[in-house]
Image: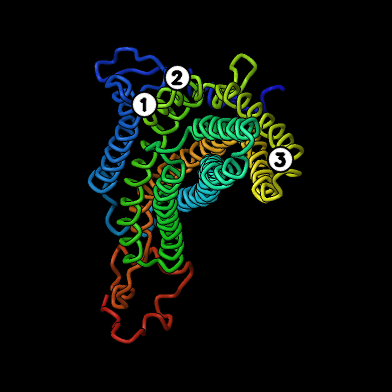
Amino acid sequence: MGAPPGYRPSAWVHLLHQLPRADFQLRPVPSSFAPQEQEYQQALLLVAALAGLGLGLSLIFIAVYLIRFCCCRPPEPPGSKTPSPGGGCVTWSCIVALLAGCIGIGIGFYGNSETSDGVSQLSSALLHANHTLSAIDHLVLETVERLGEAVRTELTTLEEVLEPRTELVAAARGARRQAEAVAQQLQGLAFWQGVPLSPLQVAEDVSFVEEYRWLAYVLLLLLELLVCLFTLLGLAKQSKWLVIVMTVMSLLVLVLSWGSMGLEAATAVGLSDFCSNPDPYVLNLTQEETGLSSDILSYYFLCNQAVSNPFQQRLTLSQRALANIHSQLLGLEREAVPQFPSAQKPLLSLEETVNVTEGNFHQLVALLHCRGLHKDYGAALRGLCEDALEGLLFLLLFSLLSAGALATALCSLPRAWALFPPRNPSALCSGSRLSEPLLPAGLDPGSPLRSFPGCRRRPH
């Protein structure tokens, strides 16, 4: 029988896996997944540090721009009533920043959903594998206990009843030895019993981490959405305090966006290294954590014709022993029941036990085949290396768009601030140079606006 459909690395995995890696001394580092090695850890930290460099450059650029705008503007000539140029540029800059922010928010929600789906698929595969392993342990325990009970009660009673016929007692003792051999062989099939590594615990840990990761990204997306809303309100209402709130929130979200970008980049690169060839790392790690033999792990993780079933010999011996028990019980039923009618009841009970044992044995054969657990292994890899990795890349794009949109918005705020009209009514009639350009074109100085309460006409 051929191996079940397995996992194949995606194009994104191949692309990210080909990126060069270097440690803190800028020496090349192999791209094979080795999180326990210091050089590889430094390579991932260096990838994350690139986001920190981007944050620093962004803050420096914003600071230089604001200083130049505030301190290096040419003075306006006295009595100038021309509005400050750049109002259209400010408007379009804010519009572009808001559009990029909205697109980034949509991409972020999609990426967060994809990542969550991939992790959920990983957890589901682990839970299904745990169910299979638990079913194997349960069937083995139930079958061994049933056979042991039959040996202690029915077979002992049968030997006592058949004691006058030594040849019949020998046949009953032969059935006892075969039942004990089946129990001994079946005990070796519960290979996961007593193993400290539990797929259920791993699934719970993964779900716990994913819950907080999902919550953190939702909060980040909501923060950026609030920044967009405050920007719209501040520009529409020309409210300076809303602009101040928006500035503070923009700086906070800018730092968070670059920080998440670093985590996403390092995680995506490390995940691509793992997903390019996951079998060796998973085999070594599982062997270290469980202490199981490499034959058993290779059979389930690889599941191909080159790897034989490590339990085949036990299954064959158990099947032969069950067949021998059947033949011995049929012989005893023909020979012993006519002479010893009291032997019929223990013989019928023994036949029922053997039938149940055979049913459990066939279930164990199906569960012990590599097809089921290998299918769970492939599903876990597809969830982690396809959906989760794709979601991480979308989140990386979201962080990049967010950082660019926030930087653009922060650079546009000073010009928007300068274009806002003053809120003090006396400033509208003071005749100052700042308020004159804000009057509508063609407004007569003697209009009712000049008679605004608290405004008096100044003598010429």
Residue 19 tag number:
2
Front residue of this view, candidates 447 and 179? 179
Residue that sits furthest to the bottom in the current view: 453
Q: Is residue 244 above or below residue 350?
A: below
Q: Which residue is mark 1?
A: 288
Query: Residue 163's image quarter?
Result: top right
Q: Secondary structure at mark 3?
A: helix
Q: Amino acid at mark 3?
A: Ala
Q: Secondary structure at mark 2?
A: loop
Q: Amino acid at mark 2?
A: Leu
CA gap between label 3 and label 1 equals: 55 Å
- The reply to whether callout 1 and callout 2 are in contact (CB within 8 Å) is no
Characterize the local packing of mark 3: few (<14), some (14-19) or many (20 or more) Cα atoms within 10 angstroms.
many
Q: Which residue is mark 3?
A: 336
Characterize the local packing of mark 1: few (<14), some (14-19) or many (20 or more) Cα atoms within 10 angstroms.
few
Residue at the (48%, 42%) spot, across then down: 395
Front residue of this view, candidates 343 and 410? 343
CA gap between label 1 and label 2 equals: 30 Å
Front residue of this view, candidates 195 and 223? 195
Of pointers 3 and 1, the one earlier in the residue sequence = 1
Instruction: List x then y, in percent, for residue 147.
Output: 56, 42
Residue that sits furthest to the front in the current view: 164
Residue 265 tag number:
none
Residue at the (65%, 49%) spot, across then down: 349
User: Quarter of the image containing the N terminus?
Assistant: top right
Q: Secondary structure at mark 1?
A: helix
Instruction: List x then y, in percent, for residue 87.
Output: 44, 53
Of pointers 3 and 2, the one earlier in the residue sequence = 2
- The reply to whether callout 3 and callout 1 are in contact (CB within 8 Å) is no
Kindly report which numbered mark, 3 or 2, lies closer to the viewer in this rendering.
3
